[in-house]
Image: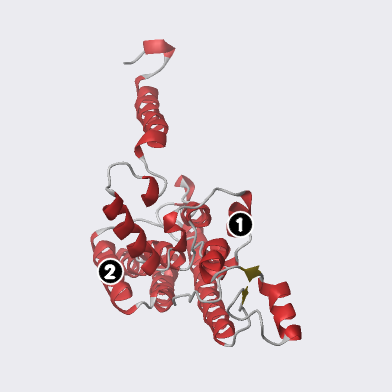
Amino acid sequence: MDGVGDKPAWTWIFILEGLLTVLAGVASFWIIQDFPDTVKFLSEAERTVVIRRLQDDDQYSAGGEELRWKYIWQSIFDWKTWLGTNLLTVPVYVAACGMTCLVGFIADRHGIRGYLNIMGCCIGAPGYIILIASRSPALSYFGVYLAVCGIYPNIPNTIAWVSNNVEGIYKQSVTLAMVISFGNINGAYRAQDKPWFTLGHGIVLMYIGIGFICSVSFLFLLRNENAKRERGERDEVIVGVNDKQDEINGWILERKNGKYDSIADAKREKGDTWSGYRYTA
């Protein structure tokens, strides 16, 4: 296709691939379903099972949610969105794949994603320190293994961790989009820095430091927030449940946390900020 449309052949690779992506994006408006309760290819009984299963997994918005700007702003101003943006990437594959699978298995089995993130930073940081300081190809090669075994598992682990701690279809979609976007920021690997690429490795080491601080902060704040909910500091006033309690205390709770006609209304309206929601470490 060289010369077609007065364009060199290589540009058509990007044009055709990009065009396919655009068409797929347009088609997604009709192909991808918004909520289980509106899916046409499921029977009523199947929709009920899917919705109940999702709601049992603390996804209260599974039964349907109206798009509101407040959910977008909730995501943007939620500290979990920003602390979940681990700025970690860099190549190598087989060892990283094995470690990623292992970390995923352990995280799913024991639910300790925050601690695994911190461990990953502690493994990856020495790898990049070696890459910066070493002038031995063999030692640098060893450093690469440490680097990727530390940072590669943290990428899907962070996405899953943030996803587990954000409720609401629209809020979750914005939060994850931001987390994934920030996570794709990379080091500055310039041709003039070869063969050691000290600047690029130093930038990624800085990202690992940011990732470590964010993971520790994320873990601490999640545990702190759960403790506040256990103490009742996040309790809402629910009509017919606790609205007849001490008048002064009830007024304070209503001012701070809101008043709702039912627990279901509180779940649907507040998502992961509902007092009964518990964050996972």
Q: Residue 30 falls in which quadrant of the image?
A: top left
The answer to whether residue 90 is visible is: yes
- Residue at x 53%, y 71% (from the top left corner): 263
- Residue at x 59%, y 88% (from the top left corner): 231
Which secondary structure, mark 1?
helix
- Which quadrant: the N terminus? top left
Give the percent coordinates (x, y) of residue 235. Answer: 61, 79
**Which residue is labeled 1 in the image?**
76
Q: Is residue 122 above or below residue 66?
A: below
- Residue at x 49%, y 60% (from the top left corner): 87
Q: Which class describes the residues within 10 Å of circle 2: few (<14), some (14-19), or many (20+)?
A: many
Q: Residue 269 falls in which quadrant of the image?
A: bottom right
Q: Which class describes the residues within 10 Å of circle 1: few (<14), some (14-19), or many (20+)?
A: some
Answer left or right for 137 relative to 158.
left
Give the percent coordinates (x, y) of residue 77. Answer: 64, 60
The answer to whether residue 210 is visible is: no
| 9 vs 135, nearest the viewer | 9
Query: Residue 99, labelled with which disc?
Result: 2
| 31 vs 99, nearest the viewer | 31
